[in-house]
Amino acid sequence: MAVMESIQANVKLGRNRVLLDCVLSSSFYMFYWFYLTWKQLGEATGNPHRPVWHALGLLVPIYGWFVVHRHLRTIKELQDTAGIKTTLNIGNLLTLFIIANILAYITIRLESMAVVLVLDIISVALFAIFLIWSQNNLNIYWEHTKGRQLAEARIGVGEVIFVLFGLLYWVSYLL
């Protein structure tokens, strides 16, 4: 298990993959992304992280926003420590996440499928922008510290499960 953990920080996630996973999974992929990248960040910082609890923290209203802030702050601190110029703006990303999160919660209470579908699409788009912007900055950090020839992370079982779950969600609009 220790060998697998050390390999985790030597890989990156491509922009197209993150976008595709986010859209296909109706943003459920976000939980896997927070899990995987928090695991990587734990290795990079040398601090033991609990990636499962970190990802599950996103489910707790309002507290999840603090989880997101901590995640982004950790990425930014690593970039600052490495002397990397960053495009990561914690305030903008957190605002984007909160808006997407609120839209996702609003859809739970609505009855009009057309309105729910539109809000879902907007929410997924905002989550995708959030994930891509964050992952791009994380990839810049990995390339700076590990070298430009990083491998693309293998597709994990969790990633497949979240995408399948999201596809089932999208199919539910057709039923």
Image (tube, helix red, strand yellow):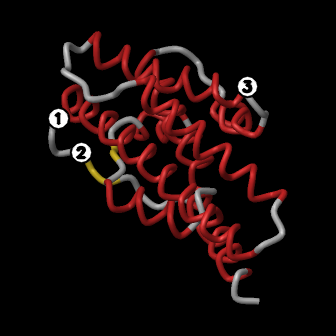
Going from the N terminus, do you reach mark 3 or mark 1 first? 3
In the displayed structure, would residue 22 be above or below residue 133?
A: below
CA–CA distance in space, label 3 to label 1: 35 Å
Tags 3 and 1 in contact by the CB under 8 Å rule?
no
Please give the name of the residue rendered at 58% of the width and 57% of the height, measured from the top-left corner. Answer: 27
Residue type, mark 3 in image: Tyr
Q: In the rendered image, which residue does mark 3 sit on?
A: 63
Mark 1: secondary structure: loop
Please give the name of the residue rendered at 36% of the width and 50% of the height, measured from the top-left corner. Answer: 13
Going from the N terminus, do you reach mark 2 or mark 3 first? 3
Q: In the rendered image, which residue does mark 2 sit on?
A: 150
Q: In the rendered image, which residue does mark 1 sit on?
A: 147
| In front of the other: 78 or 146 | 78
Mark 2: secondary structure: loop
> What x and y, as percent, mark residue 118?
60, 68
| In front of the other: 84 or 173 | 173
Image position of 53 (left or right of 42)? right
Residue type, mark 2 in image: Leu
> What x and y, as percent, mark residue 61?
78, 33
Residue that protrudes farthest toward the top in the picture? 81
Residue type, mark 1 in image: Gly
Tags 2 and 1 in contact by the CB under 8 Å rule?
yes
